[in-house]
Image: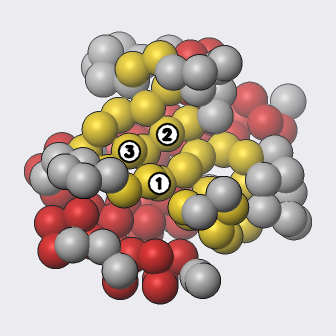
Amino acid sequence: MSIDDYLAGLAGPLREIGEKLTPIIAAALPGATGAMWHGHPVWSLGDRPGQRPVCLVKAYGSYVTFGLWRGQEITDPSGRLIPGARAMAAVKLRDVADIDPALFSDWLHAAAHLEEA
């Protein structure tokens, strides 16, 4: 299954969120490898899925999670990133209006920088 297949299989509003989010990720992480890993899309700096992972997109019943592997290490003046397991942090997206391209790009650049260091 590809990322496109994953997105195509989502219900309307969730698919719209994924389709708006993935180009933002691709633009912010031009050297990253996007692939399915553990059942959902993950973008990594290595040449294999999950090698130095930066972010993920995972759909649930009524929202899409946009997660950053080292999100708790990122300065987030918006306060939108919610800490998760280990060093992860994520935001729940219930509507395309929840996507802030500039903010998310800043997060992605910061997350990639942590992996490159």
Q: Tag 3's secondary structure?
A: strand
For image coordinates 78% across by 36% down, the residue present is 115
Locate the N terminus and report the quarter of the image it occupies: bottom right
On the image, numbered disc 2 is attached to which residue? 67
Residue 110 rendering spot, x and y as whole percentages:
60, 32
**What residue is pinned by disc 3?**
65
User: For the residue marked with disc 1, what is the amino acid?
Assistant: Val
- CA separation in Å, label 1 and label 2: 6 Å
- Along the viewing direction, whichever of 61 and 115 lies nearer the viewer: 61
Q: Which of marks 3 and 1 is nearer the N terminus?
A: 1
Residue type, label 3 = Thr
- Do the residues bearing badges 3 and 2 touch, measured as CB atoms within 8 Å? yes
Q: Quadrant of the C terminus?
A: top right
Q: Do the residues labelled 1 and 2 touch (CB within 8 Å)?
A: yes
Mark 3 near mark 1, Cβ–Cβ under 8 Å?
yes
Residue 49 appears at what percent x and percent y? 78, 62
Secondary structure of the residue carrying tag 1 is strand
Quick one: 100 or 50, which is closer to the camera?
Answer: 50
The residue wearing badge 1 is: 57
Residue 58 horizontal side relative to residue 63, left or right? right
Hey, which quadrant is residue 47 in on the image? bottom right
Depth check, front residue: 111 or 67:
67
**Compared with residue 68, is residue 15 higher up or lower down, i.e. above or below?**
below
Amino acid on which the number 2 mark rests in the picture = Gly
Q: Mark yes or no: residue 59 visible.
A: yes
User: Residue at coordinates 39% horizontally, 24% vertically from top-left?
Assistant: 81
